[in-house]
Amino acid sequence: MTNEPSLSEAAPRPPRILVAEDDDAMRALLVRTLERAGYGVVEVEDGFELGDYLAMMRGQGGTLEPVDLIISDVRMPGRTGLEALERLRGQGVSCPVLLLSAFADAETHEEARRLGARQLLDKPVDLDVLKAAVREAVRH
């Protein structure tokens, strides 16, 4: 008889968050903040990598682990956060998405809502506001 916990007794895995941010310093800050809060984080550098990851997720024909939440900058090379969100919804992926932008006008906020983003947070983002938004998004 072993003392190792069975799979049903093992601690649940922390929610996995995909962070897409082209600014290295901002991405590092987001990743560090989320990891310290206990989340598993996957990071990508731009819209190209975001699109690649989404296309290669399990359930989309790939083998990469699905994520529980996506946090994406709106303006990135390759594919904007709004374009990625639209593609995601078109593929039937329903995980929550938080968008970040330093340049969001009323039209961008409206487009984010129309595409089903949980929130569009303005940069510079308050880390406490971000963590609260993440907690709320992964809870549902």
Image: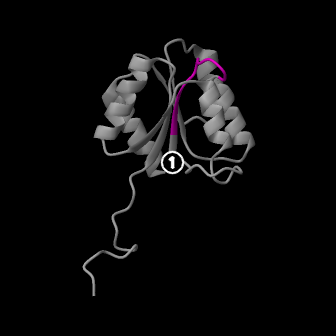
Q: Tell me the amino acid under the disc marked 1.
A: Asp
Q: Residue furthest front?
A: 1
Residue 67 at what x, y percent from top left? 53, 47
Q: Is residue 96 visible?
A: yes
Task: Tell me the residue at 40%/73% (across/down).
Answer: 7
Query: Measured along the vertical axis of the image, is residue 87 above or below residue 102?
Result: below
Disc 1 is placed on an element classified as loop
Residue 100 at what x, y percent from top left? 50, 24
Task: Tell me the residue at 62%/19% (across/down).
Answer: 108
Residue 92 at what x, y percent from top left? 71, 47
Task: Tell me the residue at 49%/13% (across/down).
Answer: 102
> Which image quarter holds the N terminus?
bottom left
The chosen color scheme is one colour
Query: Measured along the vertical axis of the image, is residue 136 above or below residue 27?
Result: below
Mark 1 neighbour class, 10 Å CA radius: few under 14, some 14 to 19, many 20 or more:
some
Nearest the eye: 31 or 82: 31
Report the predominant secondary structure element of the magenta stretch. Answer: loop
Report if residue 71 lies within the magenta region. Answer: yes
Report if residue 77 lies within the magenta region. Answer: yes
The part of the chain drawn in magenta is 70-79
Residue that carries the numbered disc 1 in the rendered image: 68
Task: Tell me the residue at 35%/25% (across/down).
Answer: 29
Nearest the eye: 90 or 47: 47
Q: Residue furthest bottom?
A: 1
61 sits to left or right of 112: right
Q: Residue furthest left?
A: 3
Q: How many marks?
A: 1
Residue 74 at what x, y percent from top left? 57, 21
Q: Is residue 114 visible?
A: no
